[in-house]
């Protein structure tokens, strides 16, 4: 690679980060992810791990600050900037790690190995963001930028890590092509460009079955809307519940009586818990009677010292029969880590009066369907949980035949948060080969086929209803069967490469020091001769010098 001046590396990083963000919704210019990564690779031409960290950090800031702008809208400047800085620091760590890894001999010698090695490092650090800090924040993984491109199909093989890795490989090959053309190495440049195009094209040939395997489900979904965007969306008690009940009555009128097998409402769609409030229970009963089908809806429940984010299954004539509690509450939104410290930076932490506790049950809700004379297992992934690999895979392995993603996007206004989340739902549909329904209080809601195609979707901040016949599927994808093994292998290879790179660098520096000492020793006699001093060739102490001074005789 080139070794550009320092100012240029930072400029390339900034432009690369900004362009990468345009690959994600709302713009969804998915090829820009390749360009953004290519610019980052070119910026990493200098052989310094410390400078590489700064380059990666700069790229990360340029990417994350606009990418999660919705955090500023929802909770303010300080949390938005702090989260962006934390995520950018991990991007910097990926770039610093890469500098060490590329010093490994076989990586350094083989150009074809470099894109793959960089992809492995990048995916490993993306995975780190999924678990750390405070339970992780996987937003902005490169895979989520590819839902309109051919690489999406790779999700069925090894999930989001493979899609992200493919983006990095294509971007790296693009950078190699640029370097080749600049050095007038046309064959090498053309080969790199064709290899990148081949990766993208080959992904498009991966089959993505969509047919039903276990019958179909007639499903309805209601987006009830709120009166105002932002944190005040739920200030009017019972408004959100009544909106969704009214929407359900309209939904019932859109289909023949008895058509629906299941109706779903979003996360927090009942702002009053009907399991403890009789009036709210009456509203839910009325909605269930209107559609004549089970209702799966979101509400909170409280204990003495915690609250839970629940999806409740409410049956006609029976009431609540099952609930799933969100397993991964959002740090600094649903619970506040280090509350006393966080309060120093923002008083908004006190808006969360009771921390949300995590549930422990698998994200599968068994729904009795009379028409099929059996229970249909519905994978129920609440809001931000859609960004986490293992939880959704656990649901698929646990028998989920479709996926439902109930979410509440009201706090994020008209920002891109909702469309980014919808892209994640599309990737999960392909990863697990399941029809997926994302249903939001305010949008974007939609019905997604098992191949990631959008069958129906809604606009933001408008009441809407969806109804669709979706296939029930039970076949596990390759990604489901592989589980965590690809990412475990990536972690192992990254650590192996890091240690090998450090060892190689230490060995080289030791050899360089030894070579320098040897070179100095070889040149020392000539320097001494030039100044009339003694040389190695002058013989042992006591011998005559070249000036003819006799050696001193022994006593």
Image (cartoon, helix red, strand yellow):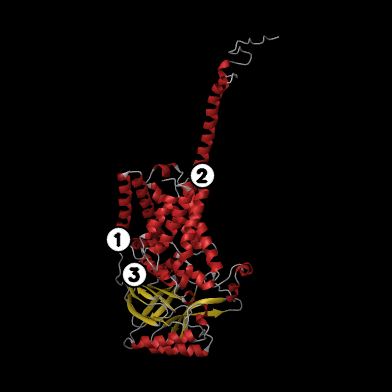
**Rendered position, 34 above or below 379:** above
Residue 502: assigned label: 2
Q: Residues within 10 Å of mark 2 (few under 14, many from 20)?
A: some
Eye-nearest disc, 2 or 3: 2
Disc on the earlier residue, 1 or 3? 1
Eye-nearest disc, 1 or 3: 1
Whole-angstrom CA distance, mark 2 to mark 1, is: 39 Å
| Residue 87 in sight from this viewpoint | yes
Disc on the earlier residue, 2 or 3? 3
Residue 450: assigned label: 3
Q: Residues within 10 Å of mark 1 (few under 14, many from 20)?
A: some
User: Would you identify the image quadrant in which residue 210 lies?
Assistant: bottom left
User: Going 43% across and 90% down the picture, which residue do you hit?
Assistant: 286
Label 2: state its secondary structure: helix
**Rendered position, 246 above or below 117:** below
| Residue 138 in sight from this viewpoint | no
Residue 426: assigned label: none
Disc on the earlier residue, 2 or 1? 1
Q: Nearer the viewer, residue 365 or 28?
A: 28
**What residue is shown with label 1?**
204
Q: Farthest residue in the right direction?
A: 555
**Rendered position, 444 above or below 57:** below
């Amino acid at each position: 690679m080139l070794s550009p001046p320092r100012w240029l590396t930072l400029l390339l990083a900034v432009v690369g980060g900004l362009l990468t963000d345009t690959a994600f919704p709302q713009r969804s210019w998915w090829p820009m992810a390749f360009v953004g990564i290519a610019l980052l690779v070119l910026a990493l031409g200098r052989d310094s791990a410390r400078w590489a960290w700064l380059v990666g950090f700069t790229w990360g800031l340029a990417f994350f600050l606009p990418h999660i702008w919705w955090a500023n809208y929802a909770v303010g400047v300080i949390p938005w900037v702090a989260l962006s800085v934390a995520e950018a620091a991990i991007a910097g760590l990926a770039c610093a790690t890469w500098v060490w890894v590329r010093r490994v001999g076989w990586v350094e010698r083989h150009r074809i190995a470099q894109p793959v090695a960089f992809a492995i490092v990048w995916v490993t650090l993306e995975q780190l963001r999924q678990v750390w800090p405070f339970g992780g924040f996987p937003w902005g993984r490169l895979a989520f930028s590819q839902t309109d491109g051919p690489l999406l199909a790779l999700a069925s093989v090894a999930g989001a890590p493979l899609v992200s890795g493919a983006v990095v490989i294509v971007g790296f090959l693009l950078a190699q092509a640029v370097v080749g053309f600049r050095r007038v190495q046309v064959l090498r440049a053309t080969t790199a460009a064709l290899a990148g195009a081949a990766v993208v094209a080959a992904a498009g040939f991966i089959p993505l079955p969509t047919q039903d395997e276990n019958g179909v489900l007639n499903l309805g979904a209601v987006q009830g809307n709120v009166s105002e965007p932002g944190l005040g969306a739920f200030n009017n008690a019972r408004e959100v519940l009544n909106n969704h009940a009214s929407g359900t009555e309209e939904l019932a009128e859109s289909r023949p009586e008895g058509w629906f097998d299941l109706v779903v409402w979003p996360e927090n769609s009942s702002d009053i818990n009907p399991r403890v409030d009789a009036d709210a229970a009456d509203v839910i009963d009325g909605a269930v009677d209107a559609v004549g089908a089970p209702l799966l809806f979101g509400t909170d429940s409280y204990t003495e010292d915690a609250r839970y984010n629940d999806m409740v299954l409410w049956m006609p004539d029976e009431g609540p029969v099952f609930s799933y509690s969100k397993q991964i509450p959002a740090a600094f939104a649903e619970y506040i880590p280090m509350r006393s410290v966080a309060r120093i930076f923002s008083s908004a932490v006190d808006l969360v009066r009771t921390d949300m506790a995590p549930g422990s049950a698998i994200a599968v809700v068994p729904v009795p369907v009379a028409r099929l004379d059996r229970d249909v297992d519905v994978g129920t992934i609440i809001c931000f949980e859609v960004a986490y690999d293992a939880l959704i895979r656990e649901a698929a392995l646990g028998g989920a035949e479709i996926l439902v993603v109930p979410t509440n996007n009201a706090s994020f206004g008209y920002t891109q948060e909702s469309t980014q989340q919808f892209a994640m739902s599309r990737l999960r549909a392909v990863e697990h080969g399941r029809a997926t329904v994302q249903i939001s209080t305010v949008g974007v809601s939609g019905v997604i086929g098992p191949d990631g195609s959008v069958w129906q979707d809604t606009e933001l901040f408008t009441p809407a209803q969806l109804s669709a016949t979706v296939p029930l599927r039970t076949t596990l994808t390759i990604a489901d069967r592989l589980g965590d093994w690809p990412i475990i292998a990536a972690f192992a290879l990254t650590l192996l490469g890091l240690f090998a790179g450090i060892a190689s660098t230490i060995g080289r520096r030791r050899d360089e020091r030894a070579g320098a000492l040897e070179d100095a020793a070889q040149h020392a006699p000539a320097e001494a001769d030039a100044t009339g001093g003694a040389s190695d060739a002058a013989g042992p102490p006591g011998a005559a010098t070249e000036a003819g001074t006799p050696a001193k005789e022994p006593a």
